Image (tube, rainbow, N blue to C red):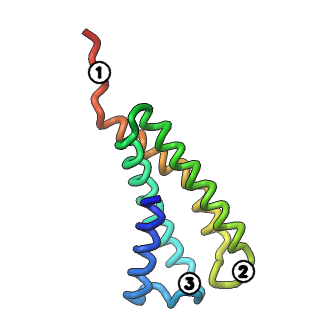
Amino acid sequence: MQCSSLSLGTDQLLHTLKVYPPWGQPMINGLFLVATAYRLVYGVVGGYITAWFAPSSPVKHALLCGLIGVFLSTAGAVVTWNRGPAFEPHWYAISLIVTALPCAWVGGIIREGLVEPPRNK
């Protein structure tokens, strides 16, 4: 998934720049808000890119990508739930689950809106 790679790359960059604490150490809620913000943007971009490459029904393809994001985010929440302070707060994991599908949908809608529908002759 392109957006997961982009998110992890951004995470690593922010850790390297010492904006985020070292891996495995807890972050404050404000930093989780930063992470949520760029993940929202990347989710919309992922939906847009998926819709762009779709051979037909671009929004449906974007929504499928969003469903995959819901599944992966849910799996991540289950694996990390109550695993210690490095994986808190719980609202963050829930926000990734809840926003995956709407972000992909928005990306698909944006792409569909940019493509001119065929004209009837």
Which amino acid type is marked by label 3?
Met
Q: Position of residue 10 (x, y in %)?
A: 40, 74
**Distance from the alpha carbon under mark 1 to that under mark 2:** 53 Å
Label 1: state its secondary structure.
Answer: loop
Give the total of numbered labels.
Answer: 3
Q: Which amino acid type corresponds to the residue marked 2 in the rendered image?
A: Arg
Quarter holding residue 54: top left
| Residue drawn at the location 29% of the way across and 37% of the way down | 114
CA–CA distance in space, label 3 to label 1: 50 Å
Seen as rendered, the residue at the extreme front is 55
Give the residue pinned by disc 3: 27
Asked whether 45 or 29 is in front, the reply is 45
Quick one: SS at disc 2? loop
Q: Please tell me which of labels 3 and 1 falls first in the chain.
A: 3
Label whose residue precedes the other's in the sequence (1 or 2): 2
* 10 Å crowding of disc 1: few (<14), some (14-19), many (20+): few
Circle 1 residue: 118
Q: Position of residue 105 (x, y in %)?
A: 48, 44
Other-residue count near label 3 (Cα within 10 Å), few / some / many at <14 / 14–19 / ≥20: some
Residue 83 shows which numbered tag? 2
- Sequence order check: which comes first, mark 3 or mark 2? 3
Above or below residue 84? Residue 68 is above
Cβ–Cβ below 8 Å for labels 3 and 2? no
Which residue is rendered at x = 48% and y = 51% of the image?
A: 103
Residue that protrudes farthest toward the top in the picture: 121
Separation (CA) of disc 3 from disc 2:
14 Å
Name the residue at 27% across, 17% down. Answer: 119
Q: Residue 121: percent from the left, percent from the top? A: 25, 9
